[in-house]
Amino acid sequence: MVSGPSFIQVLEGDDAVQKNRNIMGNTDPKKADIGTIRADFADSIDANAVHGSDSIDNAVKEISFFFSETEIYAQEHK
């Protein structure tokens, strides 16, 4: 799953899961739109350069796997 250093982050905002998936592109880099992370950087479906949750439920599970509650801080909007 990992072939080099990893950067793990939690994104927040309206429709964050879908917006992030749009930026990542199709899981198959051959089907991903030009300009997406996977189209530009992925080698194959198995080495697709980036992971992002596919649903809010999975995001909650994945966030709790990598972070404790004390490590997550919500952005204060002004």
Image (cartoon, grey):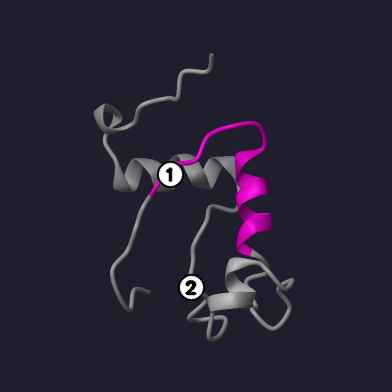
Rendered view: 34 above or below 23:
below
Q: Secondary structure at mark 1?
A: helix
Depth check, front residue: 3 or 53: 3
Rendered view: 60 above or below 75:
below
Mark seen at residue 52: none
Number of the front mark, 1 or 2 = 2
* Percent x, y of residue 39: 64, 76
Q: CA distance from mark 1 to mark 2?
A: 21 Å
Q: Which residue is mark 1?
A: 61
Q: Which residue is mark 2?
A: 49
* Percent x, y of residue 12: 53, 34
State the quadrant of the N terminus.
bottom left
**The magenta segment:** 9-24
Q: Secondary structure at mark 2?
A: loop
Q: Quadrant of residue 28?
A: bottom right
Q: State yes or no: residue 21 in magenta.
A: yes
Mark closer to the chain start, 1 or 2: 2
* Residue found 60% across the figure and 62% down from its top: 24
Q: Are marks 1 and 2 in contact (CB under 8 Å)?
A: no
Rendered view: 28 above or below 8:
below
Q: How many other residues sit within 10 Å of disc 1, few (<14), some (14-19) or many (≥20)?
A: few
Depth check, front residue: 10 or 65: 10
* Percent x, y of residue 35: 68, 69
State the quadrant of the C terminus.
top right
* Residue found 31% across the figure and 47% down from its top: 66
Q: How many other residues sit within 10 Å of disc 2, few (<14), some (14-19) or many (≥20)?
A: many
* Residue found 71% across the figure and 73% down from its top: 32
